[in-house]
């Protein structure tokens, strides 16, 4: 039923001129899902208060509750079509009354970790793109059929929402910004193994895949107590996100996974000065896939000891700084990080190797990230002691990865198993830090077991090869002209 409802919503949104991509479909579905969820949450809290003989103070005024404007019901439990808004009346209510009312919650909230603040943030960042009040009414009717009350319902909805995020990630060139393949995330979490009581941080949270999967991993602990579950709900996960759409999706994704008031902060993480980070700001675990290829402004670069325009390199410095001593990290980064010869790359590799134990490098094949034509590695490290030995694993699923043939959990099973003992195999080997060139700290090495070399030509070498090929082509053309 839920699956069909999502398909129906997308079909209706396709009629809207303001909704042209999967990103739009997900955004518009998200704000409506959030309000439907909020209605269920408030009803549950009101019922709990009544059972205790108390009166519940609703977050939303009656006029703006889902049951009042979106799905008013008669005594028979069916939607009262005489009271349910539609057409221009519905669109005008949403645009001119509902959104301004919800936006104002940010100023009224007691703090950023409250659901009131999140309401204000969400509706301050997005707008209703459904111009037809009749289409909006159809979508509301579909959303109203969805239920969030039981864990089974939440799980099914969370899986469908993940599918929407994956489709959105596959839709465009920048898909990797929104979607990290969940099998890869789960493998990273299996290696890092966060425990209840530890804090988990992602400063480039995207759609919150790392936090959601960490929550699922930690919640699966046998004999989970009520106190431990409360710790997971309120004192474990922190995310930061710069982009408005990703921020909204991250909150909705975490809610559907069972975290009622996600601690996602809407900010540009890189504007924080590393010198200002104190012990109280640090975390036990960092899990992230920071954006790469971006260029940060000079004033942002001033916040970092190693100055570079490459976004991912700034994030890596931030993550190292944000880890507590003994803290553990699993971070996705472009594989050229291993061998780039520019000063920033060399300095960053030196920092990583000297301040952390880089114990594992997972080399991912091309096609791991849909819509992003770059190869990546995952760096696994522990802060506080220098690197003595690094175990490398070259992931080779034995097939070309693509949209119709994505990475799956089975592809990573051998990596997870071998990583426990860091055993050598045809795809894995270890490198002693003493053997690394101290001038370049180059981490690209040839697989001694016959695998491909994890090394990448510098731009200058590539340009030289292109020039040589051009020269050879010119000679060939001259010969052909001479024969004509």
Image (cartoon, rainbow, N blue to C red):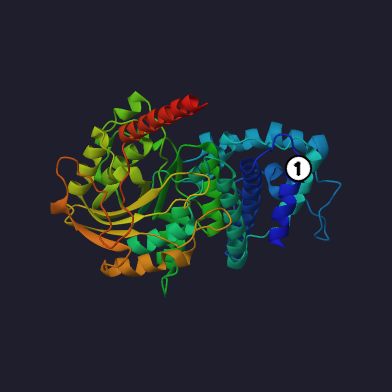
Residue 46, quarter of the rendered image: bottom right
Nearer to us in this view, 461 or 369: 461
Percent x, y of residue 220:
44, 69
Which quadrant is home to the N terminus?
A: bottom right
Percent x, y of residue 477:
46, 28
Q: Is residue 310 above or below residue 4?
A: above
Residue 429, quarter of the rendered image: bottom left
Q: Residue, x 41% and y 36% (percent of image)?
A: 293
**Which residue position holds label 1?**
136
Percent x, y of residue 266:
46, 38
Residue 329 horizontal side relative to residue 4, left or right:
left
Nearer to us in this view, 203 or 33: 203
Q: Is residue 88 visible?
A: yes
Q: Residue furthest right?
A: 82
Residue 187, quarter of the rendered image: bottom left
Q: Residue furthest bottom?
A: 223
Q: Residues within 10 Å of mark 1 (few under 14, many from 20)?
A: many
Nearer to us in this view, 127 or 378: 378
Residue 85 horizontal side relative to residue 244, left or right:
right
Q: Is residue 111 visible?
A: no
Q: Secondary structure at mark 1?
A: helix
Q: Residue, x 66% and y 47% (percent of image)?
A: 29
């Amino acid at each position: 039923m839920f699956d069909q409802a999502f398909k129906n919503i997308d079909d209706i949104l396709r009629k809207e001129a303001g909704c042209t991509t999967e990103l739009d479909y997900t955004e518009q579905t998200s704000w409506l899902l959030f309000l439907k969820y909020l209605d269920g949450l408030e009803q549950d809290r009101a019922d709990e208060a009544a059972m205790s003989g108390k009166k519940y103070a609703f977050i939303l005024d009656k006029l703006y509750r889902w049951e009042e404007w979106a799905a008013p019901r008669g005594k028979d439990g069916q939607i009262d079509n005489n009271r349910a808004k539609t057409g221009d009346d519905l669109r005008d209510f949403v645009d001119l009354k509902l959104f301004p009312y919800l936006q104002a919650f940010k100023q009224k909230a007691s703090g950023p970790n409250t659901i009131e603040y999140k309401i204000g943030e969400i509706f301050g960042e997005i707008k209703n793109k459904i111009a037809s009040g009749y289409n909006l009414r159809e979508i509301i009717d579909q959303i109203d059929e969805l239920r969030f009350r039981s864990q089974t319902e939440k799980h099914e909805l969370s899986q469908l929402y993940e599918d929407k995020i994956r489709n959105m990630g596959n839709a465009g060139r920048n898909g990797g910004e929104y979607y990290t393949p969940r099998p890869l995330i789960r493998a990273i979490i299996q290696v890092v193994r966060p425990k209840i009581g530890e804090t988990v941080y992602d400063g480039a949270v995207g759609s919150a895949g790392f936090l959601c999967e960490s929550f699922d991993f930690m919640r699966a602990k046998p004999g989970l107590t009520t106190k431990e579950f409360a710790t997971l709900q309120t004192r474990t996960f922190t995310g930061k996100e710069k982009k408005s759409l990703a921020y909204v999706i991250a909150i909705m994704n975490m809610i559907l996974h069972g975290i009622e008031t996600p601690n996602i902060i809407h900010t540009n993480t890189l504007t924080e000065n590393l010198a200002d980070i104190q012990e109280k700001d640090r975390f036990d675990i960092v899990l992230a896939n920071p954006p790469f290829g971006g260029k940060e402004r000079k004033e942002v670069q001033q916040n970092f000891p190693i100055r570079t325009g490459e976004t991912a390199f700034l994030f890596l410095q931030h993550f190292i700084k944000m880890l507590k001593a003994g803290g553990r990290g699993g971070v996705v980064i472009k594989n050229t990080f291993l061998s780039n010869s520019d000063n920033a790359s060399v300095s960053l590799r030196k920092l990583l190797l000297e301040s952390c134990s880089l114990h594992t490098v997972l080399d991912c094949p091309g096609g791991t990230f849909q819509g992003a034509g770059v190869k990546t590695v995952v760096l696994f490290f522990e802060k506080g002691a220098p690197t003595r030995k690094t175990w490398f694993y070259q992931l080779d699923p034995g097939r070309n990865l693509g949209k119709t043939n994505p990475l799956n959990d089975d592809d990573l099973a051998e990596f997870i198993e071998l990583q426990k003992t860091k055993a050598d195999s045809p795809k894995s080997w270890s490198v002693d830090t003493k053997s690394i060139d101290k001038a370049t700290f180059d981490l690209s090495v040839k697989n001694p077991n016959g695998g491909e070399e994890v090394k990448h030509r510098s731009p200058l070498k590539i340009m030289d090869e292109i020039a040589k090929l051009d020269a050879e082509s010119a000679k060939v053309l001259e010969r052909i002209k001479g024969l004509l």
